[in-house]
Structures are given as structure tokens and as C-alpha cells.
Amino acid sequence: MRDRVYIDEIGQHEGKEVTLEGWLAGRRSSGKILFLQFRDGTGFIQCVGSRADIGDEPFEAADTLPLESSLRVTGTVRADARAPGGYELSLTGFEIVHGAEEYPISRKEHGTAFLMDHRHLWIRSPRQFATLRIRATVIAAARNYFDSRGYTLVDTPILTPNSVEGTTTLFETSYFNESAYLSQSGQLYNEATAMALGKVYCFGPAFRAEKSKTRRHLIEFWQIEPEIAYADLDDIMDIQEELVCEMVERVLETRATELGILERDADALKRVVAPFQRITYTEAVDKLNEAGHAFEWGGDLGAEDETVLANMFDRPFLVHRYPRSVKPFYMEDDPHDARVTLSVDMLAPEGYGEIVGGGQRAMDLDTLEQRMRDENLPIEDYQWYLDLRRYGSVPHGGFGLGIERFVTWVCGLPHIRETTAFPRMLSRLRP
Amino acid sequence: MRDRVYIDEIGQHEGKEVTLEGWLAGRRSSGKILFLQFRDGTGFIQCVGSRADIGDEPFEAADTLPLESSLRVTGTVRADARAPGGYELSLTGFEIVHGAEEYPISRKEHGTAFLMDHRHLWIRSPRQFATLRIRATVIAAARNYFDSRGYTLVDTPILTPNSVEGTTTLFETSYFNESAYLSQSGQLYNEATAMALGKVYCFGPAFRAEKSKTRRHLIEFWQIEPEIAYADLDDIMDIQEELVCEMVERVLETRATELGILERDADALKRVVAPFQRITYTEAVDKLNEAGHAFEWGGDLGAEDETVLANMFDRPFLVHRYPRSVKPFYMEDDPHDARVTLSVDMLAPEGYGEIVGGGQRAMDLDTLEQRMRDENLPIEDYQWYLDLRRYGSVPHGGFGLGIERFVTWVCGLPHIRETTAFPRMLSRLRP
């Protein structure tokens, strides 16, 4: 593969003449000097050239070239402290690869619907570029966390024969002669693979056919879900904390330019260091009521409750031991308090709310069977899952971290929709 | 998180007493000495204890404990050259965490249907353990290849509004008030993200509702698909070659134990070094006919043809420039021969066949539109895709590598079904 020079490593070529391949992202000219904003997908750089440097005809051509035309620019790399990336290019020439039609996205304000309809082009804009690069870093950091600690990635199936949480929010499809549903979580399968491979994680898309339009929900989203054999609730909390610290640290280390483009307050992220506060659900309820936000013990924390709570903390925090009534059948009971479970969610500060949910799983076969009967769950369909309690049951637990919610918080975005290239929402299946 | 000792790093504890947490994988006893095969999800180790060492009662208990019971074993780590992992444990005691029911999978031969019905338990067996660990290594190696070379991971949508390749092999679902289909490839979306981010890849599940039962097909499979702006067919071939070499190298480096469990011929993998032979489709057809395997120029290479061809090579090889008739509309024409396209597949040796498919994409708007009209494709639905040729079109290309096919070959398996934890096949949606 031939060597190419990219903007995100342009510093290595200071003082040298290079050729960059990319697109025209912006332009201004004084009639004598041309300033081209140039992007190559790894960053943005300003190219400066005088009429004398590049010649009259090319100068005029560049001065009228539509935005997003593709071109190769050649010039000398100069350090410039005022430039966003620290460098600019003294232009000596360029080659037009393809002259674009008039580009539909301009500097003027466009409505969200217009931008979403042009999402395939909108992602070329600096803020979208920055968000998607941070998303990739977040995912790589999470994977590296698990890979470097002996976890085995085991992909769990997307097409599943049934769901323990009811079918109302499931997408259904015809699987030859039967019905299949798109997975909302790999967790039950993870429990099987954790008994085979000790420490596992899955990472894939999940689907919720929810008719809700909120700034926190996507129909299609990505989750990373570890599951650990021989682990208890405290282990699960430790892992959540360590993982989230490492993910944020990686973003701070490698994505300063992108955080700058987003004007994200990096100090808020620098506060994300262990230990995180760990409060019980009961303590969380007390905090809400003390703050004048009426909340009755036993209910689930809704988006508004989480926002109030999440505004009280300067870094992520853990809420553990939720009531039995608001958690699924597979959560282990707290042996010291039968009303609550060994569950734990992590909430992001600055009002963002839940980014992680998990806990310790019920270990005993009879308890689990009884609970499934109490909740009228299709016990016959879950014999394979119950087998995990028949053949070498062990204390175990895990959690799920929603990538898009995490990125929304890390990037400081008002809405989740920009955290993925082609979001799927209630009225949005295109492009 | 508390420090734990795992079998795959047991060598660090030679001579020390450790406690391992796991399951009973096998057992034999002389009445005086007990040999426990113990597994913890990261490996297998033999634990040896005499009646004197561990006491009469525990000895008897261990001697009758059902397989796959969960237990903690304590003992001293001893190097033993005859042991599969190089170490064994001199048992000083153990604690039964959960006594299993009689385990359904025994050493006797079980039929595939029985094992697949018990897939949630079967994955605990050494060969399945080894295959899934190698799969995880293969995936990590591919991701690291791209992450370390400046590619941005951009997840493409699974729920899509339509397909250019017809809907006969698509899973359909109701997306609120319209139809959606499960993606078979992220490629078209990748082309959009490559224009925004330069070098990208997606990695996710793909779905083919094919009524074929072959040893090479799964209904649900995972694909890694890079796409590169400003790249031509030669670049694409170079990247495929370098990627596959690195993936195989990583397996050889870190999964020797697992290859040993599978009795995979490591020499066959050690031959996987660049350069790979690059032959045209036309040369491939000649080779087939010379070998007495009649094949007419213009047809697609089927599984049988690939097998014949793939038995002629001792390492992966590239077949490029397939006829226009057997490749999709978005493949670029060869400027030197209008009958063929700038496409390239990689075939694995030892009879395995196609593991990678890709090529250079058509760059010109008019050509692409004409071709869509010729093939009666729903041109209106693909205006967003055609926009990529209206606004800064560039030479670009990419490919898809099927993870399960790759793992089948690397592990030397006769059938693709064991390369994923819970395979989805024509008559298999469970567990």
C-alpha cells in the first residue's frame, strides 16, 4: 500500500512538500490570496496560496469551485500556532478530481429534518466528524479494556425465538416457518458463554420498537455487555467504574481536537476519576425528596428523576439495590433485604442520567423458576437458560453500556441522534 | 476489582499456592490418587491429589461429583512438560460451589442435532472453547489492523428501507408504518462515511434469508467491511493481503494452545505470508479447464469451482476482474477491458474458497445511473447514494471479510456452524 499523508499526522511532515487528497470544505479569497479549508476525513487544514504561487487560471478555478468538490492539494507544511490543528499548508498547486454540483448544506441554519434527510452529506461537517471520531474512540477503548483483561468477545445472536420481557417493543420477522425477534440484549446468552469462557463480552446492535420520541432513545443502538462468572455486585461496580474511567481517559488523550470542535468542556471530563460515589436506591429516593422532587419509594427512576439526581453530581455515580418490582426476574435478591435486588445502574452527571445498567444474576434454580412462574414467563422456552443453574451454577453478573448514550454525554450533546452515522428513530428510517 | 488467578496465566504463579474458580471438566481416579480436569473458561488444567493430601471425605466427594459441577480448587502450581498447558496443580483442597445434575454431554459420540440443541452447554467443550477463543482473536486482530492505521469505525444501520439486490433473501420487519429489511452489507453506507471520514470500516451482523443448507452458509453472520476514499483496485488488493496476514499471524502468536486442541496443522497457517498470487478471473477459468474441470467464461465461480481452484494453492490468493454480468452495478468497469470489472475476491487455500469480496466502486454519476436503469433498480430510493457522485466523487473501494468463513478456514473445520456461539441456520433458531 502506497504511503499517503493524512492531516491528522501532518506534524510529521513539517517543512516538507506534501500532497493531500480530500475535499474543499470552505473558502475565502482576497482576490490576491486564497484560503482553502481542506478536509481529508482525518481532519481539517487551511491551505494558503497567492495568485503568484499557483498561477492565474488555477487561482480563478479554485476561487469559484463549489464546496465539497474533490481535489488533491500540494504544498509545504508550516507550523502555525493560530491554526486549529497547529499547521497550515502553503499551497503550490492543486488538481481538481471532481467538480461538485452546488452543495446543498451551507453555513446558514438548516432545520433538523433537512439535515437528517441529508445525513449522508451532513456527516462531512466538522461537528459530525468530531462526534463520529469520538464514538469510534469510545468503542475502541471499551474493547481494549476487555481484550486486555482476558475477556473473550462472544457475539450473541440478533435473531432470537422469544423474549422474556414481552413482545410489545420487539421487531418481529418471519424466520422461515416461525417468528423471530430482534434482540434487545445479549445478556441471557452472555450468561451461557460466561459459564463456558469465564469472562466474556458481547458488542452489537440492539433494537427497541418504542413509540417514544425523546432525546435519549434510538430505535437501533449499540451496547457493550460484559458478563463475569464468579463475580458479585461489588465486582460489577468496580468493573463499571474502571471501564468508564478508561473510556473517558482515552477520549481526553486522543480526541482533544474533536472535543475542541464540539466546544465540549474538557474539565467536566477530567473530573471523571475513581472513586465514583455509590448510593443505594433508597438513598437516591431520599436525595430526590430532600431536593423537593417528590418521589415515592418503589417506583422506577424516570428520565426526569434521573436528570434531577444527575445534576447533583460532578462525575458519574452508581445507584444500587433497586426494588424487586422495577427489575427483571433474573436479578439476584439482596440476602440482607428481600425488598431489593443486587442491581446497579451508573448515571452520568450534568443531567445526562443512565449510561450503564446491570447487576448480579439469580443463581438458584428453584428461585428463578418460581419467579418466572410468578411473572407468567414462558418457562418452557427458557429451559436452556435454566440449565445454567442445573449444571455448575456460580455467582455471576454483568452489565450493559449503551454506546450512544455514553457518546451523547461525553460529547455534551443535547440529543442522542448525532451519535451515530445513520440514526434510526420513530419517523426516521432513511437514508 | 480483586486479583484472581486464571489458568491462561498460571505460569506466573509457578511454585505458589493458588485458588482457581471454575468447573469440573473430567475426572479419573485410582482409588488413591485423584486426577481432576478443571476448567475456568480461560483454559484447562489437571489437578492431582492423593487421599492423604485432601482427606477421605473430600476425596470421596470429588470422586463422585457430577461433571460440570462448579468448584474452587486450591493447590500448588507445578511445571509439567507432559501437561497440555505446561502446568498442573497439586491439589490441597477444594470447595464445591454447586453440585451439578447428571451432565447430558458425555464423552460418547453425540449427533449434531443433539449437540446443537445443547449448544449453551456444548460451548464448554474443549474444541468449542478453542474455536470461540480463536474467533475472538481473529476479530481483535482485524479491528486492531484498522484502528492502528487511522481508519474510523463507523457502524452502519441494520434496519434499512430497501435493498439494491432484491428482497428475496432479505428478512423483513414492520417499522412502524413501513417495511424495513435487515442489512446484508454496510457497503453503500460505508461509501458515504468514507467520503466524510476518509478511511472507515464497519463491523456488524448481516443477514441472508437463504434456503440453502451448505457447510459455508449461516443465516446470521458477521462481516468486517473497510472502505477507502482515494483508493484503486491495487490498493484494495494490498490491504486485503496485509490484513489477512496480520490476522493469521496474531492467531499463530497467541492461540497455539487452541490450535493444538483443534489439531490444526499450524504449518498450513505459517505459509500465509505475502505476497499472495494475484490471478485474473480469466486466468482462473483457464486453470479450471486445464485441470479438467469444465467452466465457461462469464459464469460465477460456484462453491465447487472455488474448491477445485482453492486446492491448487498453498496460501490465500486473489482473483480479480470478474465479468460485469456476475458483479453488482456499483463495481467500476476496467478501463482496459469493458467486459470485466475492477473487482477482487480472496480465496482461502485447502479447498476453503471465498473469504473476502470487494473492489473499486463506480465513480461517475451518469454511468452509475445508466447501470441502475439497465438493471431496473429503484433509482429514486438511491438518490442519497448517487449524491456521493454529485458532490466530490473520488476513486474509492473496499471489501467485506466474512468472520465465520475466515474462522472455519483458520481452525480447519469441516462446517461453518461451530464458528459462532449460537449459529442461526435454515432449521436452527434455538437456543
Image (tube, coloured by chain):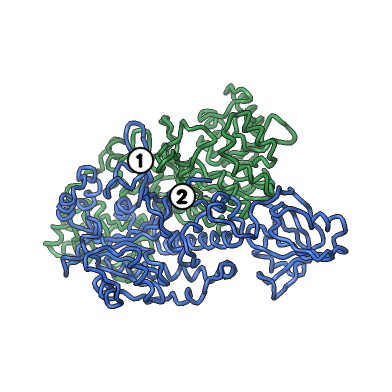
Chain colours: A green, B blue
Q: Which residue is label 2 attached to?
A: B424
Task: Using the numbered discs, state the Cα–Cα distance from disc 2 to disc 1 in whole angstroms.
Answer: 16 Å
For disc 2, the neighbor class at 10 Å (few under 14, some 14 to 19, many from 20) is many
Q: Position of residue B103 (x, y in %)?
A: 67, 51
Q: In the visual, does A259 lie left or right of A278?
A: left
Name the secondary structure under disc 1.
Answer: strand
Q: In the visual, does A113 lie left or right of B363?
A: right
| Residue B131 sits in quarter | bottom right
Residue occupying the far left of the picture:
A57
Q: Position of residue B57 (x, y in %)?
A: 86, 55
Residue A80 in view in this figure: no
Identify the disc placed on residue B172. Answer: 1
Identify the residue at horizontal 69%, vertical 65% (top origin): B10
Vertical relation: A63 (above or below) A351: below
| Residue A91 sits in quarter | bottom left
Front: mark 2 or 1: 2
Identify the disc placed on residue B226. Answer: none
Query: Which of A351 and B428 lies nearest the eye of the viewer?
Result: B428
Residue B144 in view in this figure: yes
Query: Which of A368 and B245 lies nearest the eye of the viewer?
Result: A368
Q: In the visual, does A401 lie left or right of A279?
A: left
In the rendered structure, which amino acid carries the disc numbered 2?
Answer: Arg
In the rendered structure, which amino acid carries the disc numbered 1?
Answer: Glu
Name the secondary structure under disc 2.
Answer: loop
Query: Which of A424 and A254 lies nearest the eye of the viewer?
Result: A424
Q: Chain of mark 2?
A: B
